[in-house]
Image (cartoon, rainbow, N blue to C red):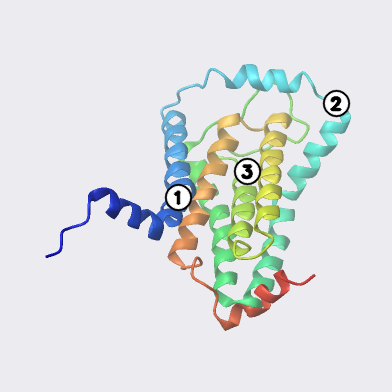
Amino acid sequence: MTFPRAPHLHLAAFLRQHGRASLALFFGLLLPLLGFAKIAQEVFEKEPFAFEKPLMLALHAHRSEALDQVAAAFSLFGSTRGMVPLTLLLVALLYRVRRRLGYFMALSLGGVALVNVLLKNLFDRPRPAFWTPILPEPDFSFPSGHAMFASALATALVVVLWRTRWRVPALLLGVLYVLGMMASRVYIGVHYPTDVLGGALFSVAWVSSLARVLHLNRPPHRAAAPLRDAAHLG
């Protein structure tokens, strides 16, 4: 006679089998999506965030020519002039390694560019007007297109490199790059902190959902061998 296993044993077995996937789903999709939704609700209802103006003015108080140049470099790299050639290059390279990776990168970066235009016109949030920016922008403020692209790029590269030895460097450098882009846009004065935070969170959820839809978490087939072999050289 057999007895059913205790509930805690079922839970332990489930976590062993699906624990990592569940964590990836929570931190990569659900949590960022909830964070974006909360910010978007307040922006849509025209509710001000009390912390934004003091934070921006405090950041602006430390303005310098050196920081201006750094912020301008970030902004140039995240602009259309930087995004388009980089996107085309990455898509072409990854397509040659594995077609699905090329499609994934195209949808990740091209998708957020299109969604950003739609969201800006939906929320029509005016730009901050606390000082005259060194690089003014003509369109709406929420969400930040620069932060969305930076976050999508970093998240997509982490996904692509996750099964290689480069996943930790990609993760660390990606976080620093996204934080730098977010800070630069607020420093310049063309975005509120919630603009860049909301954009970054949306892109994490967007790219994570694409990775799941395209089943990029599955072990690569023979067609992906060049990427795996190249990642282990040296």
Q: Is residue 182 above or below residue 210?
A: above
* Number of other residues with Cα within 10 Å of mark 1, as a class: few under 14, some 14 to 19, many 20 or more: few
Q: At 34% from the left edge and 57% from the top edge, which residue is drawn?
A: 13
Which of 54/31 is in front?
31
Circle nearer the N terminus (3, 2): 2
Q: Which kind of residue does numbered mark 2 sit on?
A: Ser
Spatial separation of the CA atoms under disc 1 and disc 3: 24 Å
Is residue 194 in view? yes
Q: Residue at x 45, y 26 (%)?
A: 46
Percent coordinates x, y for residue 145 in the rendering: 61, 45
Q: Nearer the viewer, residue 205 or 19?
A: 19
Report which residue position mark 2 lands on: 64
- Residue 141 appears in the figure: no
Task: Return the residue at label 1.
Answer: 23
Name, please, the residue furthest toward the right. 65
Query: Element under label 1?
Result: helix
Label located before the other in sequence (1 or 3): 1
Residue that mark 3 sits on: 147
